[in-house]
Structure formats: C-alpha cells, structure tokens
Image (cartoon, rainbow, N blue to C red):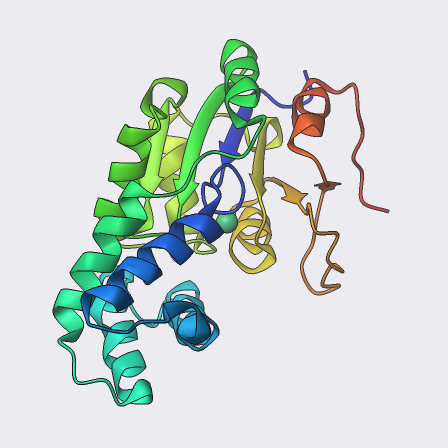
Amino acid sequence: MRYTTVLLDLDHTLLDSDTSELLAFDETMRSVGVAEPQIHFADYAAINRAYWASVERGEITPDQVRVARFQEFAEFLGLAADATSMAATFVEGLGRHGELYPGSTELLENLRSSTSLGLVTNGLGDVQRSRIERLGLERYFDVIVISGEVGVSKPDPAIFELAFAGLGFPPSDTVVMVGDSLSSDMRGAANAGIAGCWYNPDRRPADPAVPLTHEITALGDLAPLVAGRLSGQVE
Ligand SMILES: [Mg+2]
C-alpha cells in the first residue's frame, strides 16, 4: 500500500453539491415569492463563493456565512425578505438534497477495507451532519471533522491535526488528502505536510502556486492509486 490513511473531502468530491445547492436555492427563493429562482442563481453563487473564500482565509467562521450571504443577496436583488428565514430554509434544503456521485459508495467500501478513512469538510455543522446521516456515511469513516463544528477550516493545518488525532497520529508519509479544491484541499495537504491528490474531473488547469502530489480525473482511479498500482503522479 502506498497510503494507509485517506482523508476525503465531501462537497464536489463524493457529493453532488451542485444539485444540492440548486434545489435548496430553488425552494428558498420560492418560499419568499420569487417565481423564477434559476435566473438569480449565478448572482447568489458569486456572493456565496466570496464568503467561503473568506472562511478559507480564516477571516470569518462558517456560521457567519449562513445568514450573511442571504443578507447581501437580498440587498443585491432589492428583495424585502427576512434573510434569517431564507438562510434556515436553504440550510434545511442543503441537508436534504444531493446524492453521492456514481462510484462513491464502491470507493468507500473498497477504501474502508484497506485503509483508515477520515472525512475532512468545510461546511456548516448542521448541513453536513444531515447529509452524512441521510447518506449513511458515518459507517465508512474512522473520523469526521467538520469546520463548522471545530472552528478551523481547510487549508488551516489545525483542522488536519484534529483528523490526525482522531486517527491516532499516523505517520505523515502514509496519509493522502483527496479533494476537488486547490485552495482548501491541496493547499491544506501541503500545509499539513501530507500528500495531496487533486480530484479534477473537469480537467481544470492546475495552479503552479499550489503543490500537488497526485492528480486523478475519475474517482475509480483512487483505490489503485492508494494501493500503489497507479502513480497518478503530477509531472
Ligand atoms: Mg470540495
């Protein structure tokens, strides 16, 4: 085995978070009387992204994102709606919607039998817990660390330290972090001194400033990479 401990990201790695967000957004907007929610989604998404980037920089906590993004969005739209209740509708929908990508369950089954598994996710505690429970993810993981619960977010090495502690401090060279985000997952892996495997299904260009150990474009490549049968080495 090349790696005996695998840390996985949830959103956009195992979980179809795009669908989750779209459906939750649709319900939220209809709840405040907006008839065609989809035409506003890109504006909402831009505001939301900026808040989460700020979480990654350690400037605000995930819980501060919850309502602030809807305050700003309602203002932007000139919508006289209560941001707190929009946020509550949205968060409830995020927990309830979104399925695992095809192959995720097989991957988790496979990895569970040969490695220690950790889930390390940036997100709101209640949203991620609802998803984890609904999708039956708990049984696969030896440790689950959610930024909204622990007060530190990827790429801060402190969140990785919490995962290492929950896994009995495995040697660094036996651990790989797998995720779709360069700024949180791959930067985080580098900060924590472990290998990073970039899951890049859309074949986006890498950022030369962010070190990568491996890159895969299909989840099916992860088990052979972890076992050492596939290099996935970044040139
Ligand atoms: Mg992700």
Residue at x 43%, y 55% (from the top left corner):
156
From the viewer's side, name the closer residue of 21 and 190.
Answer: 21
83 horizontally vs 14: left or right: left
* Residue 73, horizontal then vertical, whole percent: 31, 80
Residue visible at 27% across and 58% down in the picture: 27
Is residue 32 depicted above or below 89 in this figure? below
Which residue reaches farthest right? Answer: 235
Observer-nearest of 107 and 57: 107
Q: Residue at x 79, y 25 (%)?
A: 230
When the figure is inspected, residue 26 is found, relative to residue 11, above or below; the finding is below
**Spot occupied by residue 70 in the image (x, y as percentages of width and height):** 26, 74
Residue 179 to residue 45: above or below: above
Question: In this view of the protein, can residue 168 be seen by the observer?
Answer: yes
Residue 224: % across, % down = 72, 20
**Which residue is at 43% across, 68% downward?**
38
Q: Is residue 150 visible?
A: no
Q: Quadrant of residue 220?
A: top right
Which quadrant: the N terminus?
top right
Q: Is residue 170 left or right of residue 230?
A: left
In-front residue for pair 235/200: 200
Place residue 138 in its image quadrant: top left
